[in-house]
Structure formats: C-alpha cells, structure tokens
Amino acid sequence: MRNKDQMLWDIGIVSFVVTELVLYLDTHPRDEKAIQYFNHYNSMRQQMLKDFAIRFYPLTLDSAEACDQFAWGMAPLPWEVCA
C-alpha cells in the first residue's frame, strides 16, 4: 500500500497531464488521439482522487462523496504541511 506523500505526488503528475491535455484540446478539438489520452488520464485521476479520499481525506469537492462521512475539514491547511 502506498503512503500519503506518494499518492499525492502521483495525483499531481496525472493532474498535470490532464491539464496539459485540456489546453491542447482547446486548440485541437478534433484530435481523436488526444481525446483518448484525455479520457484515459482523466478517469485515472478520478480513481486516484477517490482512493485518496477513502484512505485520508478528499482533495476536491468531487471526491468528497467517496467518504462515508463529511471529512473536508480533515485535510491540513496549506501552512500546516511540512516540507
């Protein structure tokens, strides 16, 4: 089982890929290969966010429903995270 820091790192990488694909698709909306990549990585990102929310706390409002209880306040504030 991966630890929290590794999961956050992986989510960050996949989120970067999804963001870049969105920017590319803004200017190339008919690129079928890019759409396939976007669909693949976006579903991967959604699953990673859900897994993280179940183990720790939700990172986005979309992943908050994965928790059995409302745990939005469980996340550390940005200034509470140690480097």
Image (cartoon, rainbow, N blue to C red):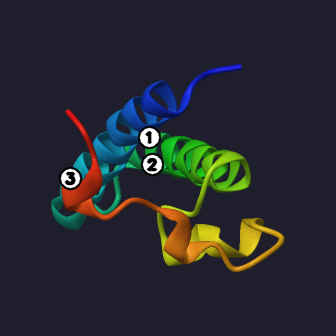
Q: Position of residue 33 (x, y in %)?
A: 43, 39
Q: Position of residue 76 (x, y in %)?
A: 39, 59
Q: Are marks 3 and 1 in contact (CB under 8 Å)?
A: no
- The label on residue 23 is none
Spatial CA distance of label 1 from label 2 is 15 Å
Residue found at x 64% / y 72%: 71
Per the image, label 1 sits on a secondary structure element best described as helix
* Residue for badge 2: 38
Spatial CA distance of label 3 from label 1 is 20 Å
In terms of depth relative to the viewer, which is nearer, 72 or 38?
Answer: 72
Q: Position of residue 17 (x, y in %)?
A: 32, 40
Residue type at numbered disc 1: Ile
Residue type at numbered disc 3: Tyr
Q: Is residue 1 left or right of 40 when viewed as pictured? A: right
Query: Please, which residue is most extreme toward the top here?
Result: 1
Q: Rate crowding at label 1 as few (under 14), some (14 to 19) or many (20 or more) other CA atoms within 10 Å.
A: many
| Quadrant housing residue 46 | bottom right
Residue type at numbered disc 2: Phe
Residue found at x 51% / y 75%: 73
Q: Are marks 2 and 3 in contact (CB under 8 Å)?
A: no
Which of discs 1 and 2 lies nearer the camera? The answer is 1
* Residue for badge 3: 24
| Residue 18 can be seen, yes or no | yes
Q: Position of residue 9 (x, y in %)?
A: 37, 31
| Location of the N terminus (image quadrant) | top right
Q: Is residue 56 left or right of 17 when viewed as pictured? A: right
In terms of depth relative to the viewer, which is nearer, 7 or 45?
Answer: 7
In terms of depth relative to the viewer, which is nearer, 13 or 42?
Answer: 13
| Residue 28 can be seen, yes or no | no
Residue found at x 55% / y 75%: 72
The tag earlier along the polypeptide, 1 or 2, is 1
Q: Is residue 70 left or right of 73 when viewed as pictured? A: right
